[in-house]
């Protein structure tokens, strides 16, 4: 098993678990991530994604497998496809990153909605040095996250971006000591779990829609305005106000 999955009442925790290969992303891991996505598509919950080995998130694609892939394999979008599925999950995803997030490992982190990392984490795209490009999302997700100039520098040079620079570039939202990483990620999901599930789903759709879509925002809001959940939550808010 390359991905250990723990299902809780209000979230799912997925742990990349190939410590002997520094959590390199191989076909088995891709297949298990597809299985996880299928479950979360059927039964939506927030997802916390992290690495099982101490000090390792994911060192990239499995080079032994990658070396043997052909042009036909590239067109199958093996990693790109599963990362797109992670990105499109109905409810928010949080990546908790400790140590290296390189190549495909970094691209998996980019596919998540929120990234937090430790002070010993770093990100990098070494693909060009291996004779390929970052073909699982970095060429468009990374510029959107950190800006075109910095993204091009990282993609062209393969330079590793340390945690504090990633925070300054807004690639991650928080940097914490390793001992606080999972507590921090869970605390974020604790706050997410307080929100109405349909409001979260529609907010994510609105934010992820390409370009500015005020019409989509209005349509989503109209659905939420008529929901029983909205009325119950606002009534409870007003009742609390009367008691204070």
Image: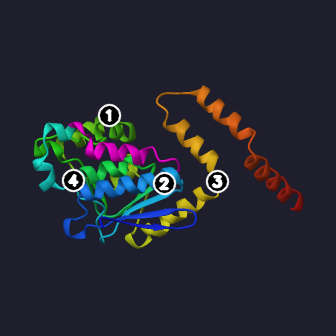
Residue at 79%, 47% (x, y): give it: 231
In the image, residue 212 lies at what x, y percent?
52, 27
Q: Determine whether label 1 and label 3 are within 8 Å by CB.
A: no
Mark 2, secondary structure of its residue:
helix
Neighbour tally class for label 2: few under 14, some 14-19, many 20 plus, Cα within 10 Å: some
Mark 1, secondary structure of its residue:
helix
Residue picked out by circle 3: 195
Residue 78 lies in the magenta stretch: yes
Residue at 79%, 52% (x, y): give it: 232
Tell which circle, 2 or 1, labels the residue nearer the N-terminal end. 2
Main structural element of the magenta stretch: helix, strand or loop? Answer: helix
Which residues, given as a range, are shown in magenta? 75-91
Of badges 4 and 2, the one in the foreground is 2
In the image, residue 38 lies at what x, y percent?
44, 52
Residue picked out by circle 4: 61
In the image, residue 122 lies at what x, y percent?
29, 57
Q: Quadrant of the N terminus?
A: bottom left
Residue at 51%, 65% (x, y): give it: 186
Q: Determine whether label 4 and label 2 are within 8 Å by CB.
A: no
Neighbour tally class for label 1: few under 14, some 14-19, many 20 plus, Cα within 10 Å: some
Left or right position of 180 against 65: right
Residue picked out by circle 1: 148
Give the distance between the C-alpha atoms of the residues marked 4 and 2, in whole angstroms.
Answer: 24 Å
Tell which circle, 3 or 4, labels the residue nearer the N-terminal end. 4
Give the distance between the C-alpha atoms of the residues marked 2 and 1, in whole angstroms.
Answer: 32 Å
In the image, residue 147 lies at what x, y percent?
35, 36
Residue 162, visible in the rendered structure = no
Residue picked out by circle 2: 40
Of badges 2 and 3, the one in the foreground is 2
Residue at 49%, 69% (x, y): give it: 183
């Amino acid at each position: 098993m390359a991905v250990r999955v723990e299902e809780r009442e209000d979230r799912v925790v997925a742990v990349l678990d190939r410590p002997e290969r520094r959590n390199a992303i191989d076909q088995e891991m891709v297949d298990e991530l597809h299985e996880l996505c299928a479950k979360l598509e059927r039964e939506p919950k927030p997802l916390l994604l992290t690495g099982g080995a101490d000090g390792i998130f994911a060192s990239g694609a499995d080079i032994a497998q990658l070396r043997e892939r052909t042009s036909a394999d590239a067109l199958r979008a093996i990693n790109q496809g599963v990362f797109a599925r992670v990105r499109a999950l109905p409810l928010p995803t949080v990546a908790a990153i400790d140590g290296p997030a390189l190549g495909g490992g970094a691209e998996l982190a980019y596919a998540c909605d929120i990234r937090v990392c430790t002070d010993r984490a770093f990100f990098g795209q070494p693909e060009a040095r291996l004779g390929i490009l970052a073909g699982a999302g970095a060429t468009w997700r990374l510029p959107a996250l950190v800006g075109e100039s910095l993204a091009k520098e990282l993609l062209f040079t393969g330079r590793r971006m340390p945690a504090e620079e990633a925070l300054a570039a807004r690639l991650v939202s928080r940097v914490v000591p390793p001992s606080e990483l999972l507590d921090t990620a869970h605390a974020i999901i604790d706050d997410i779990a307080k929100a109405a599930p349909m409001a979260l789903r529609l907010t994510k759709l609105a934010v992820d829609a390409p370009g500015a879509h005020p019409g989509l925002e209005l349509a989503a809001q109209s659905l939420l305005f008529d929901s029983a959940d909205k009325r119950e939550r606002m009534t409870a808010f007003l009742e609390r106000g009367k008691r204070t």
